[in-house]
Amino acid sequence: MASNLDKKIKEIVEMLDLLIQDTTIPKNVRKAIEKAKTNLLSQNNQDIAVKATSAIYIMDEISADTNLPIHARTHIWKIMSALESLKQK
């Protein structure tokens, strides 16, 4: 079970990395995405559901940014959906 969870987290981190490297996305948004990634990967003793919720909150905030390109918004929604599935495990 843990390996499946690790695999899902790795997939989410890869999606976050793609957005972080996308220079068409405003710098403040990329910084927030980096923060969501850091929260998700933190080694504290929080449950994965708590980490996922924290990342979802950050992603939800930036998805409303008016300067966000449409393709990035779509990726953010996809990431949020994947994070929601982490909460269910």
Image (cartoon, rainbow, N blue to C red):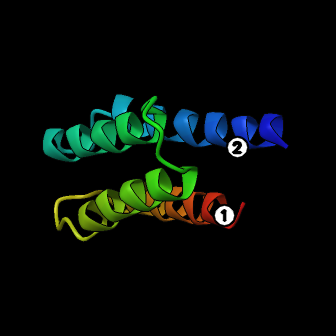
Q: Residue at x 64, y 57 (%)?
A: 86
Category of crowding for the residue at label 2, using alpha-carbon neighbours closer than 10 angstroms: few (below 14), some (14–19), many (at least 20): some
Image position of 19 (left or right of 61): right
Residue 28, quarter of picture: top left
Q: Amino acid at mark 2?
A: Lys
Toward the viewer: 26 or 44?
Answer: 44
Q: Residue at x 65, y 38 (%)?
A: 11
Mark 2 lies on residue:
8
> Could you tell me if residue 75 is visible in this image?
no
Q: Amino acid at mark 1?
A: Ser
Category of crowding for the residue at label 1, using alpha-carbon neighbours closer than 10 angstroms: few (below 14), some (14–19), many (at least 20): few
Up/down of 64 relative to 45, above or below? below
SS class, disc 2: helix
Image position of 39 (left or right of 29): right
> Could you tell me if residue 35 is visible in this image?
yes
Toward the viewer: 58 or 77?
Answer: 58
Estimate the x, y position of residue 49 in percent, counting from the top left: 54, 58
Q: Are marks 1 and 2 in contact (CB under 8 Å)?
A: yes
Mark 1 lies on residue:
85
Instruction: Identify the image quadrant of the N terminus.
Output: top right
Instruction: Identify the image quadrant of the C terminus.
Output: bottom right
Up/down of 34 relative to 51, above or below? above
Residue 60, quarter of picture: bottom left
Residue 67, quarter of picture: bottom left
Estimate the x, y position of residue 58 in percent, counting from the top left: 30, 57
Q: CA distance from mark 1 to mark 2?
A: 9 Å
Number of numbered discs overlaid on the protein picture:
2
Toward the viewer: 61 or 57?
Answer: 57
Q: Earlier in the sequence, mark 1 or mark 2?
A: 2
